[in-house]
Image: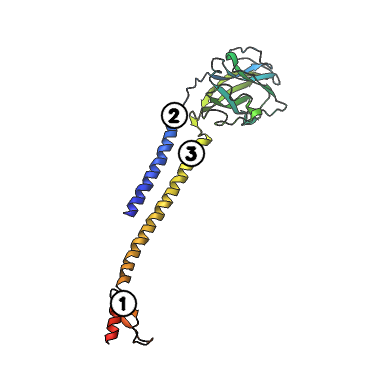
């Protein structure tokens, strides 16, 4: 019975833990966000644009090698009051020019990075402009720029992510999406033709548990383990007490050795324990 009780408690504890995890998953699923693929665009423009420059299209043009170009990550003001994006890295033919914190590594090709300030006010567009010079990649005539982005349902939470050291799931809501945008630049006869690439979506629904949720789950697990240890100790204690009871009953039936006044120290009379001491003295006097 004790083993069955312990097993039942263990199964119940595991069921409670899985129920908690299922609850957190359900809450995360209810908070998932729908993302329009055109909400964020990766564009390339001729010349070095500034934040007051107007975006023009379609994106098809030519430029000589070494000509100034601007890579733009663009979000319309129709979304910035409810959403925000963060750059988690950009590559140019495998070369990382923006790291996982959204910080640009400037060199002779990648010149600077600028971002729209206070873009969450009055429905302003959010623009991240990256200035670079057209260059000839090794063993190819294509410049492939690929950026990994994070989109969160918040307003201005990732502004100046590089300077502030923004952490996904900590400084942003936990229900966010990650995706990759790319653009290709074809070198044709010493010129560069630019076309907008397609978006590759991955990890479309990623939810990181907040630190307090992780703490709650950890505390629940610790409490369950402590309860199981106490239950096992109680079961073992009850089993020991049950094993001791027969030994005590057996001792009551054993005989004690009593010495009468007429006997020497070396002589004893075997008398059952249930015989009273007065009867023992009476027997000794008569003898």
Q: Quadrant of residue 45?
A: top right
Q: Is residue 133 visible?
A: no
- Residue sitting at 38 percent across and 42 percent down? 15
Q: Secondary structure at mark 2?
A: helix
281 and 161: which one is in front? 281
Q: Which residue is mark 2?
A: 29
The correct choice, above or below, for 255 with respect to 26 in the image is below
Is 248 on the left or on the right of 114, as rendered?
A: left
Asked whether disc 3 touches disc 2, contact meaning CB atoms under 8 Å apart, the reply is no
Name the mark nearer the viewer: 3 or 2.
3
Rounded to the nearest whole Å, what is the CA distance between mark 1 and mark 2?
Answer: 82 Å
196 and 76: which one is in front? 76
- Residue sitting at 34 percent across and 50 percent down? 5
Task: Say which mark, if any, is on residue 277.
Answer: 1
Q: Position of residue 246 (x, y in %)?
A: 31, 66
Q: Secondary structure at mark 3?
A: helix
Q: Quadrant of residue 276?
A: bottom left
Q: Quadrant of the C terminus?
A: bottom left
Q: Count neighbours of disc 1 (C-alpha within 10 A) and say few if under 14, some if 14 to 19, many if 20 or more.
A: few
Q: Which comes before the other along the chain, label 1 or label 2?
A: 2
Q: Quadrant of residue 49?
A: top right
Q: Position of residue 19 (x, y in %)?
A: 40, 38
Rounded to the nearest whole Å, what is the CA distance between mark 1 and mark 3?
Answer: 67 Å
Asked whether disc 1 touches disc 2, contact meaning CB atoms under 8 Å apart, the reply is no
94 and 23: which one is in front? 23
Task: Say which mark, if any, is on residue 216.
Answer: 3
Q: Count neighbours of disc 3 (C-alpha within 10 A) and say few if under 14, some if 14 to 19, many if 20 or more.
A: few
Is 82 on the left or on the right of 263, as rendered?
A: right
Q: Secondary structure at mark 1?
A: helix
The correct choice, above or below, for 58 with respect to 233 in the image is above
Is 268 on the left or on the right of 99, as rendered?
A: left
């Amino acid at each position: 019975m004790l083993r069955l009780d312990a097993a039942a408690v263990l199964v119940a504890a595991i069921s409670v833990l899985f129920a908690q995890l299922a609850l957190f998953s359900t809450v995360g699923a209810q908070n998932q966000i729908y993302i329009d693929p055109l909400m964020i665009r990766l564009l390339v423009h001729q010349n070095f644009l500034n934040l007051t420059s107007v975006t023009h299209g379609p994106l098809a043009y030519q430029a000589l090698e070494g000509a100034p170009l601007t890579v733009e990550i663009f979000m319309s003001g129709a979304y910035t009051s409810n959403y925000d994006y963060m750059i988690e890295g950009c590559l140019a033919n495998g070369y990382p020019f923006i790291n996982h914190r959204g910080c640009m590594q400037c060199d002779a090709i990648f010149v600077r990075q600028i971002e729209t300030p206070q873009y969450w006010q009055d429905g302003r567009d959010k623009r991240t402009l990256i200035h670079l010079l057209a260059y000839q990649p090794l063993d190819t005539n294509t410049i492939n720029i690929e950026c990994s982005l994070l989109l969160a349902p918040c307003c201005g939470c990732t502004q100046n992510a590089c300077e502030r050291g923004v952490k996904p799931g900590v400084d942003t809501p936990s229900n966010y999406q990650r995706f990759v945008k790319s653009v290709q630049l074809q070198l044709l006869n010493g010129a560069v033709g630019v076309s907008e690439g397609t978006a590759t979506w991955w990890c479309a629904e990623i939810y990181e548990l907040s630190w307090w949720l992780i703490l709650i789950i950890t505390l629940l697990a610790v409490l369950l383990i402590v309860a199981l240890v106490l239950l096992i100790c109680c079961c073992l204690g009850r089993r020991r007490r049950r094993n001791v009871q027969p030994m005590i009953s057996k001792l009551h039936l054993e005989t004690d050795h009593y010495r009468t006044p007429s006997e020497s120290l070396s002589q004893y009379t075997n008398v059952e324990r249930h015989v009273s001491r007065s009867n023992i003295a009476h027997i000794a006097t008569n003898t």
